[in-house]
Amino acid sequence: MLLARVAEVSGQVAATSARSRKIGLLAGLFAEAEPEESPLVIAYLSGRLPQGRIGVGWSVLKNVLPPAVPPAGQPALTLSGTDATMTELAAVAGSGAQARRLGLVRDLLAAATLPEQEFLLRLLSGEVRQGALDAVALEGVATAADVPSEDLRRAVMLEGSLPRVARAVLAEGPSALEAFTLRVGSPVQPMLAHTAGSVSEAVAALGPCAVEEKLDGIRIQVHRRGDEVRVYTRSLDDITDRLPEVVATALEAAGDRLVLDGEVIALDPATGRPQAFQDIASRVGSRVDVSTARAALPLSPVFFDVLAADGEVLVDHPGRERHAVLARLLPEPLRVRRTVIEDPEDPAAVDAAERFFRDTLARGHEGVLVKAVDAPYVAGRRGRTWLKVKPVHTLDLVVLAAERGHGRRTGFLSNLHLGARAADGTFVMLGKTFKGLTDEMLRWQTERLTGLAVSDDGHTVHVRPELVVEVAFDGLQRSTRYPAGVTLRFARVVRHRPDKSATEADTVETVLATA
């Protein structure tokens, strides 16, 4: 398949808001593609590269000017050829790597037509955001293969990979789905949660439910068959060798042929309070000797669900039944704290749920998950039967600079550098964000910040510290990159505050008090 066809459909999908139209466009594309090409189609339309990070960032792209369109103007780049170049880019290393990457990117663009060049630049810069996410792609594959979308969704849930299932079903037809089932030792994508504004709102939406602690750790999926244990991350990476504590715990479970869902956290030995997420992430990602890392930061697994036990697949069972199995397998200290609300219309029950939320925060955890007790486990989806509730922090911060956008944000000032007011009247940078900005907000802030500009290096526009923005964030984490020693987690712009002066922005002391 030609890359131009993928670029064309990408643009068409971006131009429509109708889900049915998106599905139809993708179905047509999958019907045209060879089955073995479907994983690449899915990846590119979702803005992902199968190779992961390939070392091509702004430092390379800022020096790449799309060359003139080839005289013939006829598309020639194929998907497989483009993928081969991406693989070559990912393998570049050593002396002269940056120049080699630049050469490869320029050669790739030189062989591309203008629409292909635009698509490739968006793909390389992470700016492919046309709404062709996996949920819509799945519907497109189902239509192209003439299989029920629910059957395909279940196969993807159990296999953990839409590209693998798509390749099989497009090549072999509906019968291929029979091969995809939950297997101990083969990770599946975890179930995720939507957000609710409050515990009472979540309880009212779900009916009978369980309110559980939401732990700020690393999501793990543990598979055990006999004496063999494998531990996977949320992204299905195998980290078994880094977590001997989890392996030991799984081997002590009461059953066999298990698939457990949980988190690994670190607790302060003196206070019992959870330690910072970044410390846990550093330990899990560490390549140093495991015994040394374990001595420096012991980790504790805590589980909240079970997908299979003694060989029986449990994902279709109600949450209440799955938890009963979990309680049989593991002692209480290894299970997440929870309270069950049987009657959501009982004010006392709702008060108990709210109290559990407050107590959870007091113990240092980040919030709660409210789960319908009669709902199945829907792997790989952000289900409406799980709702997360976390306190929302907001700050009024000053814009210190903004980076020029690319892709669909070309021509706008997008990524904002945010600062808090210091005691001496200067501003201390806390981090950056481009999230939360609507098209209208982008247009307005570009005009406003252009008028405040004091310098421009072609990438970053530094401005007079006058524009205040309200920023929501989930918490703080330590950072050596910024002068205050902290940065904001999951920061997103709520609104611009032209009604506030910079002298009314929040101070560094106020920021640190939110920790």
Image (spheres, rainbow, N blue to C red):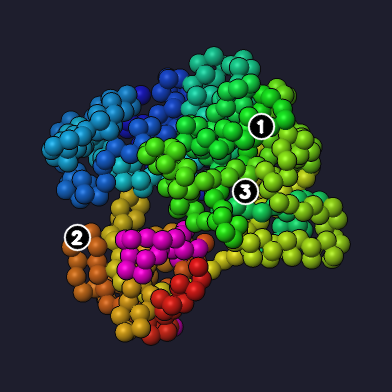
Q: Quadrant of residue 283?
A: top left
Disc 2 residue type (three-letter): Gly
Q: Nearer the viewer, mark 3 or mark 1?
A: 1
**Could you tell me which residue is drawn at 21 percent across and 49 percent down?**
59
Disc 3 residue type (three-letter): Ala
Locate the N terminus and report the quarter of the image it occupies.
Answer: top left
Residues 306 and 242: in front is: 242
Q: Which residue is under mark 2?
A: 458
- Kindly report the distance in space between the C-alpha atoms of the residues bearing marks 3 and 1: 29 Å
* Relative horizontal placement of residue 33, taking residue 379 as reference (left or right): left
477 part of magenta stretch: yes
Tell me if I can see residue 307 in this picture: no
Q: Up-down: is 20 above or below 87?
A: below
Q: Which residue is under mark 1?
A: 252
Q: Nearer the viewer, mark 2 or mark 1?
A: 1
Q: Earlier in the sequence, mark 3 or mark 1?
A: 3
- Give the residues in magenta: 475-499
Tell me if I can see residue 179 in this picture: yes
491 part of magenta stretch: yes
